[in-house]
Image: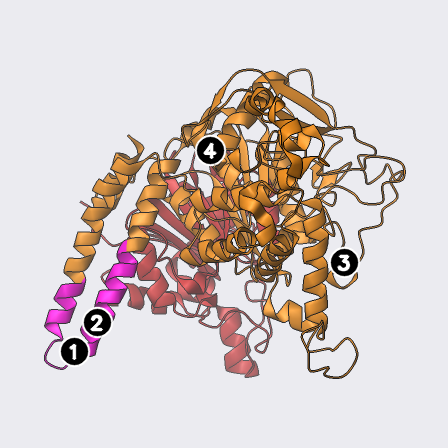
Chain colours: A red, B orange
Amino acid sequence: MRMDHQLAERWIAPHSHVLDLGCGNGELLAHLQQNRGVTGYGLEIDEEKINDGIAKGLSIIEQDLNDGLARFADNSFDTVVMARALQAVKSPDVLLLDMLRVAREAVITFPNFAHWQNRIHLGLKGMMPVSEALPYEWYNTPNIHLCTFKDFEQLCAQHDIHIVNRFAVSDSEKGHTSLMKALIRQAPNLLADVAIYRVTKQKPE
Amino acid sequence: MNARPNNTSDQSPTDTLHSASLVNPMDSVSSVGIITPQIFHFAEPLTLECNRTLPSFDLIIETYGTLNSDKSNAVLICHALSGSHHAAGFHSDDDKKAGWWDNMIGPNKAIDTNRFYVVCVNNIGSCFGSTGPTTINPDRIDSDQNNVNKNSLNKNNPASELQVYGPDFPLVTIKDWVKTQAMLSDRLGIDVWHAIVGGSMGGMQALQWSVDYPNRLKRCVVIASTPKLSAQNIAFNEVARQSILSDPDFKEGRYLQAGTYPRRGLILARMVGHITYLTDDAMKAKFGRDLKSGKFMYGYDVEFQVESYLRYQGERFSENFDANTYLLMTKALDYFDPTRDYPSAMATDSTESAAQLKDSITTSVESSKQSTQPALEDTVATIDESEQNRQQELSALKAAFAHTQCQYLVVSFTTDWRFAPERSQEIVDALMATGKPVSYINVDAPHGHDSFLFDIPRYMGSVRGFLTAPFISDSKSKQPAKGTNQNSQQKAGARS
């Protein structure tokens, strides 16, 4: 399982009702359903991935995230998950607020555009970054709203979104030494290439 | 609704126009082979929704594949308006025309007969062997016996034609059909269906099953269907009915006794129906404005290719179908409404939310009143009303689905305007709002409503995957989110 999925799993309570936005082939949902008794739906737009999810016995709904979440009532889920899709939607800010309307909590992962490799690409080479987390060329990338950890946290602050947890990981350098892990914790916006946030509209008691 | 026994298993619309599908009946790799229908007689009286009673009835069915020892691999197929029990395979060595869903059902196909025991029932009221307007009315046998010889008008007709139900056959509903299908299940010893599958009107039966017999099916596949007919849908059905009813040969439904047949009415009814099954684009691609003879004839004979096609389809249909059955089937469609048995939940649930909605809209209008033209208020009122209706429909469906226990697969087709994708999504939204397991795909296909009869890999793949996927128990069905608010309370209310 992908590292951000493993982390997302930690923050999802057993037997909760979950909405997975951009659920792919349903890997995370299947895992949560089998191991944590979670129920819920995955939204996906890729035809093959939808059929893969259906064949796993999951509840997958064909829907474009750009169409918003109007079909879901307020607080109809415990947690809404969105793994690496925020940067690919037309209005990430609107969607983020909508996520926190339909669920108490949102778990969001996205690639960090301020990762040092990206900075080298742009700063020294003068070219748009291409990396493991961002494998596309500028002209064919679905990632139209890339942001950094700082950008995301600023957006949260503007909309009174409370960050419950934050975790920075590095996809490209698995099996880090403890020193490297410590360094990532010190300077995540520079060293981590994927961010996982757990956010809520309400301040915790 | 358009489960024609005719050109259904073909791949390409262009070669389906005037030819039946040619498949080798002996091709055992892809076909269930030669099938013999079976008839089940039910001697007990059947009281229908209209409060009339059939003293007894027959169901004609076909089965494909083998029922396993614990009877857990049975799949029920529900047919559409003009369909029959003959869903797959052939009736003889010479039979060149496969059953209407032969591309879906068979060895290694989406509904795999190597794995599943598949049952397809002809519904009562139809004209393919189950009790209906063209079968003998037991009440008439005695009363008509003496009249047969006296009736000089009908001396050329066999006695059996004089004794058919004809227009006296009661109006049956989707709910009635599902009831008879449940009686058949008992007879077959099938307590729980692995899946119940239907397209169009067949999808309505599958949906009704899940509401009426929630513990008797594990999976429900609803294809190109709708939670209920729209006013436009009913309007088209009414045109079809009036075509038949106004044909002088209809003879108030007693055409068999009168020795006539409302052929023109039936052709017209089919023509208008057929237009709604296709799309503007598909018709443009197939026919354009092509002329049969290449020039205008300045008359009313067939000139454009599309006219030729429609007349051909209508004529062929009129030869295989019964006019009283067509009338009755369209009424069953119009009456379909799985929420009818759940009125109370609808009243309480929706009035509340509608009132809240009205308040919020009124507030926003008030706040912007100074700068607003009067027209805006009308617009707001219209939006208000349609949103209220939407909420009402949703609450009613939620109440109907609250007790269902199966997993659903809902399939729509992008170009279907008879039962548009939005109608399927109403079903999906209501199921999700009650926390029920449901998957939904909206398949891009050019054939309009007819798409459900085509071999579209993505569509077939979804059905295959859904039927063979592990069953995730509904016992873990959604708990309302802990943060109590008005919506989660509504949900709890609808469930209790």
One can see residue B74 in this view: no
Q: Could you give the CA–CA distance between mark 2 and mark 1, rounded to whole angstroms?
A: 7 Å
Dots 2, 1 in contact, CB < 8 A? yes
> What residue is shown at x 74% (from left), y 38% (from top)?
B88
- Which of marks 1 and 3 precedes in the sequence? 3
Lower sequence index among marks 4 and 3:
3
At label 4, which amino acid type do we have? Lys
Q: Quick check: marks 4 and 2 in contact, CB under 8 Å?
A: no
Expressed as whole percent of the image width and height from the top left, the position of residue A92 reads: 38, 66
Region in magenta: B361-388
Q: Residue A42 in the image: x percent, y percent?
A: 48, 48
Identify the disc placed on residue B16: 3
The reply, left or right, for residue B468 in relation to residue A20 is right
To which residue does mark 1 refer?
B374
Viewer-nearest of discs 4 and 1: 4
Instruction: Say which label, 4 or 2, has the lower sequence index.
Output: 4
- Please give the label number shown on residue B175: 4
